[in-house]
Image (cartoon, rainbow, N blue to C red):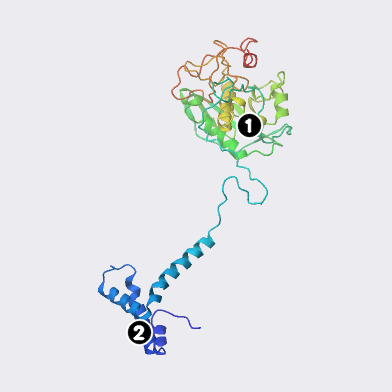
Amino acid sequence: MALWEEDEPQARSAQTLTPDRVDDVTLARRSAPTFGVRPDDPTVLQSLRDFARRYGWRAYALPVLIVITVLALMTTGEPKKQQTGQSAVPGVASRPGPPTASGDIPLKSDQPGSGARNTVLSAAALPAGGDYTKTGAGTFRLLVGSGPVVGSGTLHKYSVEIENGITGVDVSKFSSQVQTVLSDPRSWAGHGGVALQRVDTGSPDFHVTLVSSMTVRSLCGYDIPIETSCFVPSGTAGSNVNRVVINVARWVRGDAAYVGDLNAYRVYLINHEDGHALGHQHAHQCLPGGLAPVMMQQTLGLRSAATHKMCEANPWPYPKGAAGAPGAEQPDTPANTEIALKND
């Protein structure tokens, strides 16, 4: 079979056709320009009349058949959509995928509400979730990365590290989130007096470290049998540096006060423990607008020691529009610890 090109091969083939067939080819070629021209063009109308006269009812049936064929091919080639609740495997019910937290949903507290979900959340319990590393190597490695000075005032340099042996965690995401949070104007360096800079050389003022749950217990203690994070000053718990200890159990699972918004809880963890590295104590009462100060032990509870009312979970030292931030701070006592207040 010969390949038909634009001009010369067509002319040669036309010479072998009968006179009637030559007329058909002429008509077809005359009709081709109808794509994109006005439908009332006299040449076009005359061509259509000639074509219809020659082929009668077949001239009308042919376009219809072409349209039906094209539609059939399109329908056959389109993959079938699976409706919600139906399974691709006969006899097996499909399960809807888990919802994705937007990061902007309202945060929950452990105060009973007035709606249908009138359930007290266990503020100190580790929520269900993914697996996490319980026992690491007890040694730490530096995560390479540095940044500019953020804020104004006394400069505090920090590094980001992870305990060797921790698996199943996106190390790059942990590293970048620490730096992003501490660079945010709602964090400690956003309101004067404090400047922060991430470094990966020299001797930083403190190390922000992701740590396995059993190593956390050796560094932070385990007097209250709850998964917590902490700040370990140099010279205590066998540490020769100032170390912010982020518990991988909490990094993976979160906390009941932030259920449904793991990202916001991670922001809280970073700001709270780094607040200790910057010299801040715990806070035990709500800000004037009702938000929990970031230095409240929100992992343990949200009840105010001053009013015994519940504060609203809040991950930032200086949340936008909040009065009185970052809040009054005072030493812990048996009467004002959040673990004692949560069941008061």
**Tally of marks:** 2
Chain-order first, disc 1 or disc 2: 2
Q: Secondary structure at mark 1?
A: helix
In the image: residue 131, left or right of residue 263 = right
Q: Position of residue 138 (x, y in %)?
A: 73, 31
Q: Quadrant of residue 18?
A: bottom left
In the image: residue 215, left or right of residue 259 = right
Q: Position of residue 95 (x, y in %)?
A: 63, 43
Q: Position of residue 132 (x, y in %)?
A: 69, 34
Counting other residues with Cα less than 10 Å from the Cα at mark 1, is it few (<14), some (14-19), or many (20 or more)?
A: many
> In this view of the protein, which residue sits in the foreground, 308 or 152?
308
The residue carrying mark 1 is 251
Q: Residue at x 48, y 19 (%)?
A: 325
The residue carrying mark 2 is 23
User: Which amino acid type corresponds to the residue marked 1 in the rendered image?
Assistant: Trp
Q: Residue at x 53, y 59 (%)?
A: 78
- Label 1 or label 2, whichever lies nearer to me, is 2
Q: Quadrant of the C terminus?
A: top right
Q: Position of residue 104 (x, y in %)?
A: 50, 32
- The relative height of residue 117 versus residue 101 in the rendered view (above or below) is above
